[in-house]
Amino acid sequence: MNISDERMTISARQQDIIDLVRQNGFLSVEVLADRFSVTPQTIRRDINALCDANLLRRRHGGAEYVNAPSLNLPYDSRRISHLEAKRAIGAYVAGLVPSHASVSFGIGTTPEFVARAMLDHEDLTVITNNLNVAMTLSANPSNRIILPGGTLRLPDLDFLGPQVEEMYRNYRVDYGVFGIGGIEPDGAFVDFDRAEVLARTAMLESCRSSILVADISKFGRQAPARGGRLTDLDMIVLDAPPPGDFAALFDEPTIRGRLYLAEGEAA
């Protein structure tokens, strides 16, 4: 089993359909066909594929968004969402982190894309609770991989709990690369499990340079566990400028200059 393989690839149109349905709650086949200047049959095929991947839900005459904002998508759905954004972010961060560095990777699909982009780096020391990251970077025999003990969470293939926090605190690394469940209007981070917050906190306390990797869909995303904020970070790598009112967060003196945009990096 190759856990780095993508089980489904979504097209640019399908990603746009997801985004439009998320914004509107529900859209009909006819509206989407008109929006993209394609036949209703083409839209139905797109909707069927996206529903089979749990990215949308079928409703008579169209599709609705599958999750409320405060619920996390299934792992297999997350890893095929915003693919181009994640690839661009991965390529950009790979250019920031040199060979021979020590790097902590957090859980989530965007750090996994960073790991893929760093596969040609040499002699990395990798500390992670993300088994997908470990498996990806273990393909380069010059790398050293450090994992925690504990129980493997399925299907995400990551570790959480006190052993993870202890692992991160036992090492001092050059870079910490992590994703996030959501970013609130005041710049606070939210996640779907308190254990995720505790693991991230331990990781960030132990790295010299912290790098948040996130596509802009994370702005305004709701989740129950709160911890950390944009002002805590050294670098914030996004695929595009922050949307709407969130752009004002980056005008603050404490955050200005920490934002990096990966637009077009994977092209």
Image (cartoon, rainbow, N blue to C red):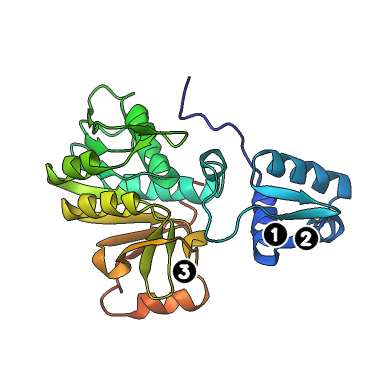
Which comes sooner in the sequence, label 2 or label 3?
Answer: 2
Q: Crowding at label 1, few (<14), some or many (≥20) Cα neighbours within 10 Å?
A: many
Type of the residue with mark 3: Pro
Type of the residue with mark 2: Leu
Nearer mark to the viewer, of 1 and 3 = 1
Q: Look at the numbered disc 3 and give the secondary structure of its residue.
A: loop
x 24%, y 32%: residue: 147
Q: Is residue 122 visible?
A: yes
Q: How far, Cα to Cα, is label 2 from label 3? A: 25 Å
Task: Please name the residue that numbered disc 1 is placed on.
Answer: 21
Does residue 67 lie above or below 134 as drawn?
A: below
Nearer mark to the viewer, of 2 and 3 = 2
Residue 9 left/right relative to 224: right
Label 1 close to label 2 by CB (< 8 Å): yes
| Quadrant of the rendered image containing residue 171 | top left
Q: How far, Cα to Cα, is label 1 from label 3? A: 20 Å
Q: How far across and down, in percent of the image, does residue 259 sit?
A: 35, 66
Which comes sooner in the sequence, label 1 or label 3?
Answer: 1
Task: Please name the residue that numbered disc 2 is placed on.
Answer: 27
